[in-house]
Image (cartoon, rainbow, N blue to C red):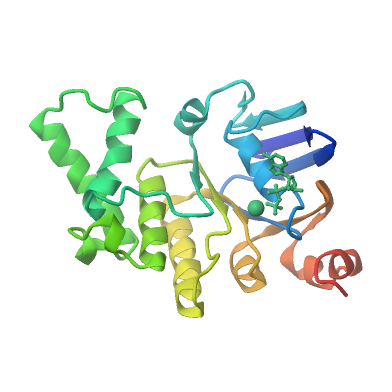
Amino acid sequence: MGILEVKGVNKRFGGLQALGDVNLSVAENTCHAIIGPNGAGKSTLLNCLVGKLIPDSGSVMFDGQSVLGRKPYEINQMGISRVFQTPEIFADLSVLENVMIPCFAKRDGAFRMHAVESVESEAGIREEALAMLEDVNMADKKGMLGSSLSRGDKRRLEMAMCLVQRPKLLLLDEPTAGMARADTNNTIELLNTIRDKRNITMCIIEHDMNVVFSLAERITVLAQGTPLVEDTPDNIKGHPKVREAYLGE
Ligand code: ADP
Ligand code: MG
């Protein structure tokens, strides 16, 4: 039984079947990659896991509880955190403040962020945020404004904003999209470090096969909204159906 169990999930947009009978089981403390061509339904599936979309049918269980019918912030509080395809950070706040905000939100609940803080608790949160910035190698940039960061640093910051909430499951939708090779390699290293340090389960959507093969223990190939095959990276590499449907051979 995985920490995440998706069973028989269907999702239609009008006449389009974006997801058809999707099953997915993600084991705790592993990295599970979801690959597939554009339009395969990868982001739709992720959106169904975080409450942004509601499946037409099927079940999504996380840590033994159903996520269906819960609001995104409730699912976040259950321990699922998500990195967006385009980094979502606060442009007018410093790097450190960006990482402190999710701490306040987690402690006080998403809708009580303006609760009066005691000085001690703010100091604790500042310390925690700084430690997180150390982990993502951004401590030296703590005073910079969000808007002034490079694309790679914005991603790294967003990662810190997710991780500081201490999620059990981290969902990443194309975390290296638009990155240069050097930043992509840094991201691989960063994700591997985070896994070792924090025992975190990851589910990653990724186009870059180098990233997928460097991180994932299991890979699900999605094609036209349906899982084509689920296997280890080594088996996926040589799978004829995958080469045909995904690699275009
Ligand atoms: P992927 O992330 O694998 O590229 P998506 O999950 O974004 O694919 O999209 C799957 C299919 O669903 C595509 O055909 C896309 O156009 C369609 N789709 C996604 N979101 C919506 C939406 N909100 N409304 C209508 N169609 C959508
Ligand atoms: Mg997508």
Quarter of the figure with residue 103? top left
Q: Residue furthest left?
A: 119
Image location (x, y in percent) of residue 198: 42, 51
Taking 58 as reference, is 103 left or right? left
Residue 33, compared with residue 102, is above or below; it is: below
- Image height check: is 125 above or below 54? below
From the viewer's perspective, tell me whether residue 56 is left or right of residue 61: right
Name the image quarter holding residue 174: bottom right
Of residue 179 and residue 239, the one placed in the foreground of this image is 179
Q: Horizontal and vertical percent for residue 158?
A: 39, 53
Residue 229 x, y percent position in the rendering: 84, 55
**Quick one: quadrant of the N terminus?**
top right
Viewed as shown, does residue 220 lie left or right of 189? Answer: right
Residue at x-position 15% and y-position 23%: 116
Total labels: the figure holds: 0
Q: Residue at x 18, y 45 (%)?
A: 126
Q: Name the residue furthest bottom.
A: 182
Of 28 and 86, nearer the camera is 86
- Compared with 202, 125 (above or below) is above
Name the quarter where the C terminus is drawn: bottom right
Q: Residue at x 45, y 73 (%)?
A: 183
In the rendered view, would you say 209 is above or below 5?
A: below
Q: Residue at x 42, y 49 (%)?
A: 88
- Front residue of this view, candidates 52 and 109: 52
Q: Is residue 176 visible?
A: yes
- Residue 35 is left or right of residue 85, and the answer is right
> Can see residue 3?
no
